[in-house]
Image (cartoon, rainbow, N blue to C red):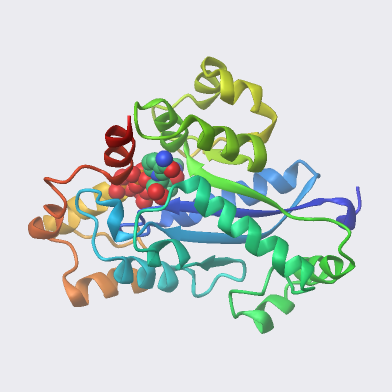
Amino acid sequence: MTLQEKTKVVLLACGSFNPITNMHLRMFELARDHLEDTGRYRVVKGIISPVGDSYKKKGLIEARHRLEMARLATQNSDWITVDDWESQQPEWVETAKVVRHHHAELISSENNNDDVDTVRCGKRRKLEKNKNICQSSSYNKTGADSPNLNLLCGADVLESFSVPNLWKPEDIEEIVGRYGVACITRCGSDPEKFINQSDVLYKHRKNIHVIREWVTNEISATHVRRALRRRQSVRYLLPDPVVSYIDERSLYSAESEQKNADVILAPLQRYTSTN
Ligand SMILES: Nc1ncnc2c1ncn2[C@@H]1O[C@H](COP(=O)(O)OP(=O)(O)OP(=O)(O)O)[C@@H](O)[C@H]1O
Ligand SMILES: NC(=O)c1ccc[n+]([C@@H]2O[C@H](COP(=O)(O)O)[C@@H](O)[C@H]2O)c1
């Protein structure tokens, strides 16, 4: 299969990123290697979409800080970008809607003959140095193919599909059926078993790429926030500029961890109250 015949893929990661960790960045690299190793895909862009404040997760600090940390973490990447559309919405936005929004943006940039890879990240010059992406950009102009948008997530997110009142069944169907998922394994997770046990996931199993992280790695934002509250070092768990950003503003404390402590998570609130 020639480069031009491969399906272009854009990876979209939705999450709290409270704060962004090296594992969040590694997810993108793992997924790109895995998809490109199949010989069928060309990963042209990664998008990080931090959730808005109205998600109301316990300990969630303001989106402007989470966005800025994600921007600092990706400033040297030539393919991963940060997008603030989701976090700017006045209400919490379902992930299916976020995926739909980004897919519509991709299609519209294709139709406008924009470079899918560069249109919204403002890193045109840097990207043009990347031969692979340069070729894919010129290919876009022919309009010969349209990119796939895959939701990039950890296995915990996939497994959360079965939590009552957390996800609408039609949203799950849309995410896995229409777009597709790139799922990174986490300690204690068994995504293949989970897919087998779920009728909707099994039906769309060809759209779910399970990507094994062999170097089992439990860097989690929860662990990072805990270490910060205890004044322990988080260096090498987060990119250096993110560590400095947090330190300079003392972003995480016992007090910040109590944010939203008495509030119900937005999806639970939305779906429980409409039932
Ligand atoms: N160590 C990890 N291995 C695989 N996936 C991960 C890992 N850490 C985070 N992710 C994934 O990154 C995405 C965004 O993560 P998010 O910030 O919402 O979760 P988190 O790091 O687990 O945060 P928290 O600990 O605050 O719940 C999710 O899809 C999550 O599954
Ligand atoms: N029904 C839904 O669309 C739904 C439910 C729960 C979480 N999510 C999303 O999953 C992501 C990860 O959330 P957590 O940080 O809680 O694991 C967030 O972006 C959140 O918006 C979506």
Quarter of the image for the C terminus: give it. top left
Q: In the image shown, does 117 or 1 lie closer to the viewer?
A: 117
Q: Farthest residue in the top direction?
A: 197
Q: Farthest residue in the front direction?
A: 274
Visible residue check, residue 210: no
The quarter holding residue 19 reads: bottom left
The quarter holding residue 65 reads: bottom left
Q: Farthest residue in the left direction?
A: 255
* Residue 42: image location, x then y, percent: 75, 54
- 17 to 84, vertically: above or below: above
Left or right position of 2 against 234? right
Q: In the image shown, does 186 or 160 lie closer to the viewer?
A: 160
- 234 to 109, vertically: above or below: above
Q: Residue at x 75, y 74 (%)?
A: 114
* Residue 93: image location, x then y, percent: 41, 52
What is the number of callouts on the image?
0
* Residue 130: image location, x then y, percent: 73, 72
Q: Residue at x 11, y 45 (%)?
A: 262
* Residue 53: image location, x then y, percent: 29, 60
Q: In the image shown, does 232 or 66 lie closer to the viewer?
A: 66
Q: Residue at x 67, y 34 (%)?
A: 207
- 114 to 22, vertically: above or below: below
Left or right position of 122 against 239? right
The quarter holding residue 102 reads: bottom right
Visible residue check, residue 115: yes
Q: Residue at x 47, y 33 (%)?
A: 158
